[in-house]
Amino acid sequence: MPTFYDTQVASPMMLGTAQYPSPAILAAAFSASGAGIATVSLRREAGGGQDFLRLIEGLGVALLPNTAGCHTVKEAVTTAQMARELLGTAWIKLEVISHGDLLAPDVFALVEAARELCAQGFKVFPYCTEDLSVCDQLLRAGCEVLMPWGAPIGSGLGLNNLLGLKALRAAFPEVPMVIDAGIGRPSHAAAAMELGFDAVLLNTAVAKAGDPVTMARAMAQALDAGRAAYMSDPIEPREMATPSTPVIGKAFLQ
Amino acid sequence: MSAAFTILGAGVLGLSVATELATRGHAVTLVDPAMGPGGHGCSWWAGGMLAPFCEFESAEEPVLRHGQASIDWWERHAGGVSRNGTLVVALGRDRAELDRFARRTEGFEVIGGNRVAELEPDLAGRFDRALFFATEAHLNPRVALAALQSGLAARGISVTAGPPDDAGEVIDCRGLAARDILPDLRGVRGEMLVLRCPEVTLARPVRLLHPRVPIYLVPRGEGIFMLGATMIESDRRGVVTARSVLELLSAAYALDPAFGEAEILELGADARPAFPDNLPRIGRAAGRLYANGLYRHGYLLAPALARQLADHVETGDKPEFWHETDDQR
């Protein structure tokens, strides 16, 4: 099971808390998913959102507040400070968004904000691209977790850059890594785990499914399958057929 | 002065319950410190869409079933119901949203650009595909509330600031203010605008689907439109944020650029009362009956709640939306 900043969590799933049809369905989805961590957006809910926060706290999982919707270092740092005060946790999922269409991370502001927050004692979970040099900078800034995107937030496109994600995994084998954003289906979640990632963060794929509770369960099963596959050292793909039954006693093909 | 029933709260639910009971011949008093409906209650800021099929996209089955019956109730008790249906559209890049909406709902026909132009000439050429929910309806909430209030006045029932000496059975319809006796109740913030845009004529509510900022425009006649609405997990009332106004107006502009010239008549925000499953409840708390938790379905479900409450006080049977509290089980 993954460990983030010396805290071991019971599940490779992080689940977001936005966009569910109702808090009751949100709670049922969490229960079906077994997720160990709930992400929560403070930016819009902060003023007067205490009832909702109480509901989220009632889920009985660790809370990972995020800085969703922040576009500048200053906004992100202020939101992180607010989250620490409100929720009493130094964990912060750091999002600094640059481009509105893709909600792509602003990697320059991200590194700067990460440096500032790490210096202030935060345990930063940066939402980043799979770019090796950006991730290197984030680790130097003090981050001990990386959260590369699979695809743009809410797009459901899966793992867009397999080569880049594999390279990232190989470059920093000891760093806990979470695929954040872009997962649409259980097969995407399984693929992320098969690549050796430690966890997956989901929200839209579950919350906006016609039946969020059943989808949450399907995602949990996929994560388990993907993790088990990674641990079992799967075969490498090859371009020639290899017979799985012995050929002794049969005619050899020319 | 005495009454068989004293209803607390003169919002959409209190007025509906009072109307239903009074129509059935019960003696009713209606109590609201503000002496009537107004901007202090969230039903003042509602869209007034009677759209059970569209709401079924994210709501549960009872909303669909009871919502359909609400249209006739409003016509009978308040009048002013426009039965022109609902048009649901999406911009080119969000067409997948239209497919999803179609999968999640019923009671519509898929129409092409020509039919869109027939239904809403001002949207001609802008959408080559849409969903048309022909049996849905809409009303103007403030007109409807006033109609219920004057209907009650015609029966000699006016809104008083405080309860009568002999209040009879008290029915609490105070919405979010009833959190003092209903701890499960939470607020879901909604923000809206009222626009005047005489350049645009729409015959029916138009919903523009978008993964992040779905909006609807409800025509109120004479070039007036209600543009809504945000859904934020917060009980904050009062002022609208710049971000919400930007998002709502941008979406309206994308629907029809003519809205760029609209005058902004009102900005409004309030918090909808909701229980954790976002479905309404009738029950008993603090020694009184209550009905609450209409969430974003005030006008759609108030008639059903009013009827169920009236049936309950007449027969004692527990209605569909009855909620047992722990100490009653």
Image (spheres, rainbow, N blue to C red):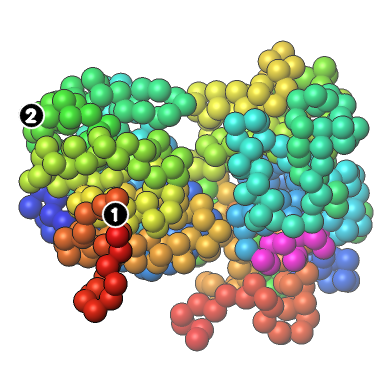
- The local secondary structure at tag 2 comes to helix
Image x and y of residue B267, in percent: 62, 27
Quarter of the image where the N terminus of chain A is located: bottom left
The residue at 18%/22% (across/down) is A112
The residue at 60%/23% (across/down) is B250
- Which callout, 2 or 1, points at the residue further toward the start of the chain? 2
Image x and y of residue B177, in percent: 54, 53
Residue B68 versus residue A238: which sits nearer the camera? A238
Residue A223, compared with residue A81, is above or below; it is below
Q: Is B179 on the left-hand or right-hand side of A87?
A: right
- The local secondary structure at tag 1 comes to loop
The amino acid sitting under disc 1 is Met
Residue B73 versus residue A10: which sits nearer the camera? A10
Read off the residue under disc 2: A140
The residue at 51%/52% (across/down) is A208
The amino acid sitting under disc 2 is Arg
| Magenta segment main secondary structure | helix
Quarter of the image where the C terminus of chain A is located: bottom left
Read off the residue under disc 1: A240
Chain holding disc 2: A
Q: Which residues are magenta?
A: B61-70
